[in-house]
Amino acid sequence: MEINKPWEEMTPRERGNANLRLIKKGERTQEQIVAVARMGGIASGEARRRKKRLQDAAKWLLQQKDVISNKDIKARLAELGIDDATNAEALMLIALKKASMGNVEAMKFVRDTGGEAPSNRVELSGDLDKPVATLDLRNLSEEELLRMAEARAGDPDETGADEA
């Protein structure tokens, strides 16, 4: 394939492969670089606006009432004391039902939406300037290991008892 062949003269295969060719530094003029960057910025803005519109539509739909057409769901929500239910509440009921039947993704959704998502952070405490001491557990007796485990189990820092 000719590197500087005009687009109009390229075969469909050459056109497809032209986008795959790595462009080396210095092959584009400053104007081309600016034009490509501008196109990328415009596309990024359009994608952000599209995502925002979708998010706003989802929020609006979740807040709507009387859109729930399933009478069983309406009746169950009414039994739970939710007479004026929104779509969000109906979806939670559906997810909870699926979770109770063993659907792991529904279980995660209900847990996370309820604010019980596991933490993704790791917190370190102590003197972080010193290297971590290593303990060779192979030299300890079974009794010593059991005592260490019991002491660790009673430590409030390890059980999360001090967190409220």
Image: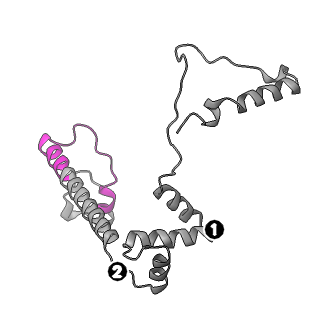
Q: Secondary structure at mark 2?
A: loop
Q: Amino acid at mark 1?
A: Gly
Residue farthest front in this picture: 81
Residue annotated with mark 2? 67
100 lies left or right of 45: right
In what element is the residue under mark 1?
loop
- Magenta stretch: give its range: 14-39
Q: Nearer the viewer, mark 1 or mark 2?
A: 2
Q: Label 2 is placed on what type of residue?
A: Val
> Where residue 135 sits in the image (x, y, percent)?
73, 19
Q: Residue at x 53, y 18 (%)?
A: 128
Q: Quick one: 118 or 156, which is closer to the camera?
A: 156
Number of labels in the image equals 2
Please rate how many residues cluster around mark 2, counting C-alpha atoms within 10 Å: few if below 14, some from 14 to 19, many from 20: few
Q: Determine which residue is flagged by label 1.
A: 102
Q: What colouring does the structure picture have?
A: one colour
First-in-chain label (1 vs 2): 2
Q: Quadrant of residue 88?
A: bottom left
